[in-house]
Image: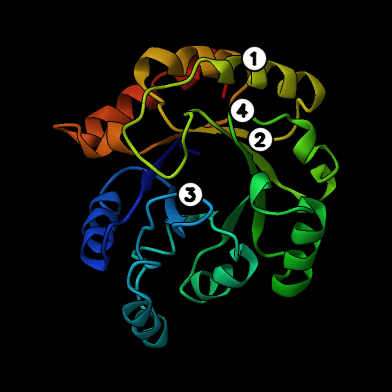
Amino acid sequence: MSIVVPAVLPSSLKDLKEKLALFATLPIDRVQIDVVDGRFAKPASWPYNAPDEWRKVVAQGELLPAPDRIAYEIDLMCYDAEDAAEAWLALGATRLTFHAESTTDLARLLASARTRYGSIVSYGAAVNIASNLALIETSMGEIDYVQCMGIASIGKQGQPFDTRVFEKVIIFHRHHPKTPLQIDGGVSLKNAQKLLAHGVSNLVVGSGILRAKDPAAEIAKFEGLQSWFGV
């Protein structure tokens, strides 16, 4: 299983299709699509910036390439996360990441989503760098993985890595050593080794792959690290 999860924050349908087409050529088994509503996080990404176009895409029912090989994870940076997930699941997504700060009751949101969408979907909880891990503690029974944000302001790619995440990773892994933990934001080859050494399972990488001259070679460098830590 790949430790690298390429991520795309689409500005348009064309942008999303182009980047998903690229990812489909790479040796990966997961892709994260960042969905930003412009309220919970800013600026709004596609499809929130083109709702009419989004309705047409959903009606057509085709968007995500190579679904037999790639699991699509939707990072729901939005206040209407549970409702927004429905269309993405209809298009073939199988993993949903809900942000703890987007709701007043994360446990209830996750339980409702499980009731609504079933157990064939994987459910994750994301927590911001400045937030206390206590926000997700009461929801651990409802989630399959946790995502710690590695940047100060979510919803934007290319931001610098925030080293405060190391302490979060250490604390979380100490209390929940068997729960898969992924880091999203600012991940690079410079900090990846330390993250893996502290128990991180997956590295969500956006601009680091998309801006690389050879994305496949860049992924291979990250994947080469897993033998060091038995990931």
Task: State the residue position of label 4.
Answer: 130
- Give the Cα separation between the discs numbered 4 and 3: 15 Å
Q: Residue 189 location in percent, x, y?
A: 36, 18
Q: Of the residues under marks 1 and 4, which one precedes in the sequence?
A: 4
- Give the number of the disc on residue 180: 2
Q: Are marks 2 and 4 in contact (CB under 8 Å)?
A: no
User: At label 3, which amino acid type do we have?
Assistant: Ala
User: At label 1, which amino acid type do we have?
Assistant: Glu
Q: Decide which of 173, 39 is in the foreground and name it.
A: 39
Instruction: Tell me the quarter of the picture where residue 110 sits.
Output: bottom right
Count neighbours of disc 2 (C-alpha within 10 A) and say few if under 14, some if 14 to 19, many if 20 or more.
Answer: some
Residue 226 drawn above or below residue 87: above
- Give the number of the disc on residue 197: none
Q: Are marks 4 and 3 in contact (CB under 8 Å)?
A: no
Q: Of the residues under marks 1 and 2, which one precedes in the sequence?
A: 1
Task: State the residue position of label 3.
Answer: 41
- Left/right placement of residue 203 relative to residue 112 reads left
User: At label 4, which amino acid type do we have?
Assistant: Ala
Q: Residue 219 location in percent, x, y?
A: 32, 31
- Residue under the image location 28 percent in, 60 percent down: 16
Task: State the residue position of label 1.
Answer: 167
- Give the Cα separation between the discs numbered 1 and 2: 17 Å
* Colour convention of the picture: rainbow
